[in-house]
Image: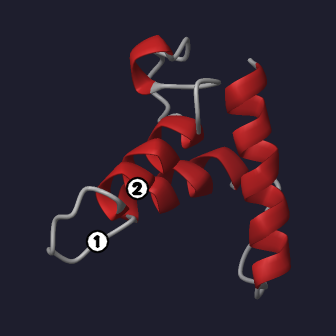
Amino acid sequence: LGEGHTPSTCRRKSGRPCLGCELDAVLNSMHSGDREPLSPVDFLYSWWSMASDTLAEYQQQDAHEFYLSALSGLSAAVIS
């Protein structure tokens, strides 16, 4: 996420996971050179806990809805 948001400077220290920090961890794992499988479960949990009030329960969500929800969560993480 560049210099705009890093886990070391994250202001959200509440019990909720920060979507920006989790995406940063996924991207760092992808580019680390490590050949182990990557599981973005923490990122998905962070997104789900952030977006649980906006998602339609028990209805199918498509990639576009995920994308918009994830962008909304990331902008909130970076701006706040």
Count how many numbered circles sit on residues in the image.
Answer: 2
Residue drawn at x 48%, y 36% is 21
**Of 18 and 28, which appears nearest the observer?**
28
Quarter placement of the C terminus = top right
Q: Residue 76's spot in the image, x, y percent? A: 77, 31
Residue drawn at x 58%, y 49% is 49
Residue picked out by circle 2: 26
Residue drawn at x 14%, y 74% is 36
Identify whether 61 is placed above or below 9: below
Say if mark 2 contacts mark 1, CB within 8 Å: yes
Residue picked out by circle 1: 38
Question: Mark 2 or mark 1, which has the lower sequence index?
Answer: 2
Quarter placement of the N terminus = top right
**Of 20 and 41, which appears nearest the observer?**
20
**Of 10 and 49, which appears nearest the observer?**
10
At numbered mark 1, what does the secondary structure look like: helix, strand or loop? loop
Q: Residue 4's spot in the image, x, y percent? A: 65, 24
- Quarter assignment of residue 29: bottom left
Q: Is residue 11 at least partly visible in the picture?
A: yes
Q: Amino acid at mark 2?
A: Val
Q: Residue 16's spot in the image, x, y percent? A: 49, 31
CA–CA distance in space, label 2 to label 1: 8 Å
Q: Amino acid at mark 1?
A: Leu
- Quarter assignment of residue 75: top right
Question: Could you classify mark 2 by the number of other residues whose Cα lies within 10 Å: few (under 14), some (14-19), or many (20 or more)?
Answer: some
Report the side of 80 relative to 7 (left or right).
right
Q: Is residue 56 at least partly visible in the picture?
A: no
- Quarter assignment of residue 15: top left
Identify whether 32 is placed above or below 60: above
At numbered mark 2, what does the secondary structure look like: helix, strand or loop? helix
Identify whether 29 is placed above or below 79: below
